[in-house]
Image (cartoon, rainbow, N blue to C red):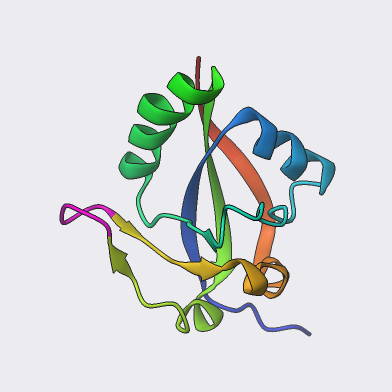
Amino acid sequence: MTSQSATTTLWRPTGPKELDLVRQLGWRAWPPRLPEQPIFYPVLNEDYAVKIARDWNVKHDGAGFVTRFEVETEFLARYPVQQAGGRTILELWVPAEELDEFNTHIVGEIQVVHEFR
């Protein structure tokens, strides 16, 4: 019998290219960062993710998506919560070189919960 680990819900505003890569990975992992992306930024609240997807991704990529996924809470403890602006603008900063390990701690599938065009 396996014990269920506690999980934390994270969101990620995502453009169409990144979403296609997530789809190719079976909705179970985030793709490697590009050289100009040294950090992977999942966010801690849905409203912040919606704002980025709607206001930034749509403008730059023609579409924006908000994804939701669960990660083992114990593993996330290594990443201090970063306040990137206002009180509710909270994110984690995962170094690109740690993303493969981060992906192994995702529980279940990455889900698209909002779409903006």
Q: Is residue 88 magenta?
A: yes
Give the quadrant of residue 98.
bottom right
Tell whether 116 sits left or right of 111.
left
Q: Position of residue 81 (x, y in %)?
A: 34, 71
Q: Residue at x 75, y 83 (%)?
A: 2
Does the magenta portion include 7?
no
Number of marks in the image?
A: 0
| Residue located farthest toward the left when viewing the structure as drawn | 87
Q: Main secondary structure of the magenta part?
A: loop
- In the foreground, 10 or 36: 36
Q: Which residues are magenta?
A: 84-89
Residue 114, horizontal then vertical, whole percent: 49, 29
- Horizontally, is 97 left or right of 72 in the view? right
Where in the figure is residue 71, as x and y percent of width and height? Answer: 57, 67
- Residue at position x 50%, y 14% from top? 117
Measured as percent of width and height from the top left, residue 7 is found at 53, 70
Q: Is residue 101 above or below residue 113?
A: below
Task: Give me the residue at 22% from left, 53% from top.
Answer: 88
Judged left or right of residue 82, residue 5 is right
Q: Residue furthest front?
A: 36
Quick check: 44 above or below 71?
above
Query: Splitting the image into 4 quarters, where does residue 22 fall?
Result: top right
Quick one: quadrant of the N terminus? bottom right
Q: Residue at x 44, y 77 (%)?
A: 79
